[in-house]
Image: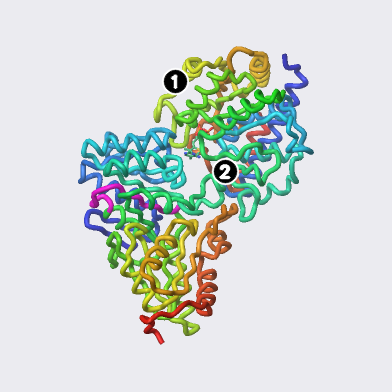
Amino acid sequence: MLKPAEKKKLADKARELREKIIEVTYTCGGAHVGGAFSQHDILVALYYKYLKIDPKRPQWPERDRFVLSKGHGGIGHAVILGDKGYFDEALLDDFNKTGSPFGMHLDRLKVPGVDTSTGSLGHGFPMAVGIALGARLQGKKFRTYCMVGDGECHEGSVWEAAMAGGHYKVTNLTLFVDRNGFCLDGDTEEIMTLEPLDAKFEAFGWRALTIDGHDFAQIDEAILTSQAEKERPVVIIANTIKGKGVDFMEGQTAWHYGGLDDQMKEKALKSIRGK
Amino acid sequence: MAKAQGLTWTISDADHMTQAEIYGEVLTQIGKTNKKVVALTTDLAKSTKIGKFQPDMPDRFFNLGIAEANMMGIASGMAETGLIPVVSTFAVFASLRAAEFVRTDICYQQRNVKIIATHSGTSFGQAGTTHHCTEDLSVMRTFAGMTVIAPADARETGKAVEAVIERDGPCYIRIGRGFEPPLYKDMDFEFEIGKANQLKDGTDVAVIACGPCVVHAVDAAQQAEAQGVSVRVLNMHTIKPIDEEAILAAVMDTRRVITVEDHSVIGGLGSAVADVIAASGKGCAFRKLGYQDEYSIVGYPDDLLHKYKIDADGILETIGEVLKADFEEDEDWEDE
Ligand SMILES: Cc1ncc(C[n+]2csc(CCOP(=O)(O)OP(=O)(O)O)c2C)c(N)n1
């Protein structure tokens, strides 16, 4: 059980970093801010409680791995990595600008702390299954965490990886689905039906947990459950809100990707602080 | 407001439209009269502008979710029934993610599918390497039966879209993200698949370019002209089938050839031109401008064109270089 003080610490950190995401979105001219906010609380829980990592040794072989398969969430990931001290946060001032180490989608060869370069959807999850298998084969104790988008689950390769993960019982992997209900063009169910998503994963040999992806207590409990499960790999289907934290972005498909002017930035920051 | 018009479409404000916007509009107009045309995309209806097709013809529009390989297979099947599927996604996903489906389901089986890929080259420069595509011309060109086109601007894109719908067989058109400056000021130019457009005559150097580099080639040629160098510019909008005649004429008339593309120098326009020159047995100075077996840095498209020397400055510099280059003369050497 997450202690109240711990919960508050995570919530405060999440709020602080949401503000930072808004600042970077403002300076870089536009970003995938909607999906960065829906994934955000889970990433904060991972990076500030669960991942066994050492920002001073980004290549430490025994570190836990995190693969952001929905690579367009890179802005949110980068802000967290900066805060953890993987690199000088001032570098984020040039996010996406010419010569910057940061593209919209993070490059593991350029950004310390990034374990896997992603951005083309449907790649990260197969690589995460490979990392988990490699770790198990060599008796390594580290755990792999991976996050896919729900729209990303339209990709066949996601289901090929799910089949392999179920087959090989990769219980040293925890998969999150950022179930914000939207892909790029709109509602996932209108574009290509995903439901029943939990039953699909179950049919592929996974244990599916469904949680509120913005509730730290539920995130905490689900992660602990996934770590303890030894029979089937666990997928945590996290119901989230695209654009979570900024009132005018929440649930708006138009905020999949967008830029902010001065006024919008202030409005967004206010909204984040107010909550 | 400047009008643009093809045989089957008219657009009133072409000056302010990107390649993709023109594409979406032209396809929609064609779709209204040609009921065999169906439009498919993978959660990129808005980004590629193929979504313009949907409101008027919802039953002939398919948004398949983020599943590019599946889209190519479905398009192939639809073509089998006599439809003309037009599919759109980003170039990197069309040409690489779905490559085998394009080759085996569409080209091998000679299915009449039109692939219109956006965000090609480094036009989505800020997104990073996963979204750059400097390989598509090369990949698509190797598929037997595939026609490959890289229009220079929005107006030429309009003509190209119309031409591929008319043409029988698999076709690939690559366009940018939408910040490409116009080359043509009106619709008063020819567009024939497989036939280069000579934009400027010249006798010292020939610059053969495609896509967003054509505008820069013209700019460089004009600057060179001011310095007394006579530069021919060819808009080689069709990479396959390539216009051998225009290439050979350029070799014979100038003996110095530069190719320019927003693409790897391996396998794309430069390689296609080199093939023709090598087979001809004629000597000439030759440079391929493009990405030199490397992944582009992150950046704004204009900055990238500059850094990788495929803008006017880079082309001008290379013109200076080839003027000094040595090459073996042969008996057909008539230039001096
Ligand atoms: C293979 C591939 N196809 C298309 C895209 C373009 N694209 C980027 S984000 C996106 C929508 C993703 O939706 P989802 O996975 O639900 O992400 P979220 O809503 O969490 O942002 C698309 C289609 C891509 N990055 N990769």
Front disc: 1 or 2:
1
User: Which of A79 and B127 lies nearest the eye of the viewer?
Assistant: B127
**Whether residue A248 is visible:** no
Q: Is residue A107 left or right of residue A162?
A: right
| Colour setting | rainbow
Quarter of the figure that contains the N terminus of chain A: top right
Residue visible at 32% across and 58% down in the picture: B241
Query: Residue A41, image x and y in percent?
Result: 65, 28
Reply above or below: A10 against B199: above
Q: Earlier in the sequence, mark 1 or mark 2?
A: 2
Chain letter of disc 2 in the image: A
The range drawn in magenta is B164-177
**On the image, numbered disc 1 is attached to which residue?**
A195
Mark 2 residue element: loop
Q: Crowdedness of circle 1 by 10 Å Cα count: few (<14), some, many (20+)?
A: few
**On the image, numbered disc 2 is attached to which residue?**
A31
